Image (cartoon, rainbow, N blue to C red):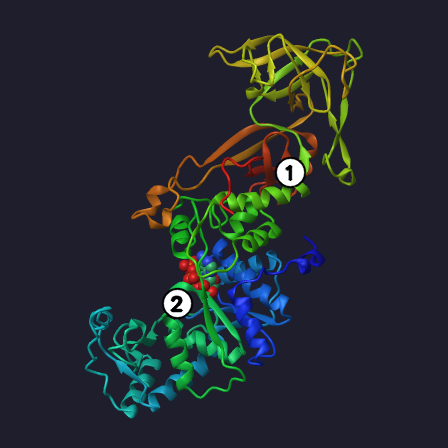
Amino acid sequence: MSEAEMKEEKIPRNFITDIIDTDLKEGKFDHVATRFPPEPNGYLHIGHAKSICLNYGLARDYHGTCNMRFDDTNPVKEDMEYINSIKRDVNWLGFKWDKLCHSSDYFDKLYGFAVELINKGLAYVDEQTAQEIHDSRGTLTKPGIDSPYRNRTPSENLALFKKMRDGGFEEGKACLRAKIDMASPFICMRDPVIYRIRFASHAITGDKWCIYPMYDFTHCISDALEGITHSICTLEFQDNRRLYDWVLDHISIDHEHRPHQYEMSRLNLEYSITSKRKLNLLVEEGLVDGWDDPRLTTISGLRRRGYTPGSIREFCRRIGVTKQENVIEMAALESCIREDLNVHAKRAMAVLHPIKLVIENYGQDGITQTEVKCQNHPEHPEMGSRDVAFSKEIFIDAADFREEANKQYKRLKLGHEVRLRNAYIVKALSCDKDAAGNVVCVHCEAIPGSLGTNVEGHKPKGVIHWVSAEKCLRAQINIYTNLFKVANPGAAEDFLSTVDKNSKIEIKDAALELSLADAKAGDCYQFEREGYFCCDSKYSKPGCPVFNLTVALRETKKAAI
Ligand code: ATP
Ligand code: MG
């Protein structure tokens, strides 16, 4: 999709655009500033695409700004590889950020705000263990219990916090907690931890820090420092909004406009995992071929599978933005790429399970064609045409021939005729079988004068595709089904055991028309009668492509949206 086409895309109205419109009308803000804040602890997935399309889309539609912010506060799990892949994926989806920021850019300032809270008597160094802190939090029906360290004086806390920063405590032996309300009905307000000790090298700040701020403390301050107006996250952070506001209420931060947090529902997609932690497990356990395995709904997996940026944006547009939790059917995602490729993908012929078909009267009766012209797209003549080699011996798919079959079978059977796509009508005369009884070769005759035209007295019911056996490309085609055996693998106790080990089928020796030797990584085709396929970026070599099934030609069941 061109940049011009993309400008045509607009986020359909939703509760967030309503809020923005009201804010702008009331003069609360005169511009819109959003951010997309991934933690660089894995590759982006389709759930992130929803957030990206919304945050960057709002900036586009309201002529505002959207920052890319790496929420890099946990050095143990974060990595440069992830940072680079995230940047690439956001750009690939078609979006450009205004500023590239990192939470770590604010470590000095965050430290200063923590000191301010300490000075105000609003934060204290707790030396309980993580377990003790957890156990004294209370429950929804029971208030928490004060830490024995809760009433330390600001000067005591300042010295201890400095000691934390200087590496004077072992990991887990001390943390900084906001002093809020141990009886709050919101557990996140019961003196949340805002700094912890981690002796780990950070991807950007290296070994400068051994204390790292927690998400709830970092996020709101980063938003305020960047001048974010609408800070959008997912519903599980609803309660945390209180903490977001509490922090901003109690520090002296210059912000022109106070940022606000809004929550939307997460995207949940059937047969798919949208948690970086779980995706990481699949990769580490070797159950998939890396983060970009075409069966994964990571952005990089979808790209390798043949999804286009436009199809993913269209999917996000269709699912919309609400506060309603729901699960989207895979068919909804698939129909977006199918509609896109139906318009944009060139047609080509590939025989997945080749058997030979010999035209016995080739060279006689005017049956002499050595190539036939094929349109690259039936509805788009401007996409041009190509000459496909034709010969006495061609390949057809094993499924397209039967010795006998009932009337429903519209392909080739003995004594009957079928049209070879863009070529002759052929009549099957006999067939040869191997020792196991499988048909390996069909002998037939071509009907004179039938090249691309009808002939009196010959009305074949079906059309089948084919490839010259003499001039073709033998290549690998990968067929995929759902990676998981269950619709909601995320909910399974042992989700790794729900992986379907047969979800990738490698067809090693398919027969493809020669033009496909020029396919480049990422090129998508409709292999006629088979489906949409994409040239794999990992295993293809020049002149020797490997293809991945993107999506079948038709839906197997109706999409929910
Ligand atoms: P993960 O568990 O995959 O790491 P996360 O929410 O922790 O998910 P982040 O990288 O921290 O991922 O999130 C970046 C942004 O993307 C956040 O604003 C988050 O709310 C949003 N996001 C993540 N997953 C989804 C999802 N499934 N649907 C919508 N938004 C999502
Ligand atoms: Mg996260």
Residue 391 lies left or right of residue 47; in this view the side is right
Q: Nearer the viewer, residue 200 or 5?
A: 5
Question: Is the residue 17 above or below the residue 259 in the image?
Answer: above
Q: Give the CA separation, mark 1 to mark 2.
A: 42 Å
- The kind of residue on which mark 2 rests is Phe
> Is there any visible trace of residue 508 in the rendered image?
yes
The local secondary structure at tag 2 comes to helix
Q: Position of residue 99 (x, y in %)?
A: 58, 72
Q: Position of residue 68 (x, y in %)?
A: 54, 68
Residue 96 lies left or right of residue 425; in this view the side is left
Residue corresponding to mark 2: 237
> Is there any visible trace of residue 39 in the rendered image?
no
Residue corresponding to mark 1: 525
Question: Is the residue 524 above or below the residue 278 in the image?
Answer: above
Residue 541 lies left or right of residue 144; in this view the side is right
Question: Is the residue 140 above or below the residue 475 in the image?
Answer: below
| Residue behind label 1 places its C-beta within 8 angstroms of ligand 1 | no
* Among the 4 quarters of the image, the one containing residue 416: top right
- The kind of residue on which mark 1 rests is Tyr
| Residue behind label 2 places its C-beta within 8 angstroms of ligand 1 | yes
Q: Residues within 10 Å of mark 2 (few under 14, many from 20)?
A: some
- Circles 1, 2 touching at the beta carbon (< 8 Å): no
Residue 368 lies left or right of residue 206; in this view the side is right
Q: Residues within 10 Å of mark 1 (few under 14, many from 20)?
A: many
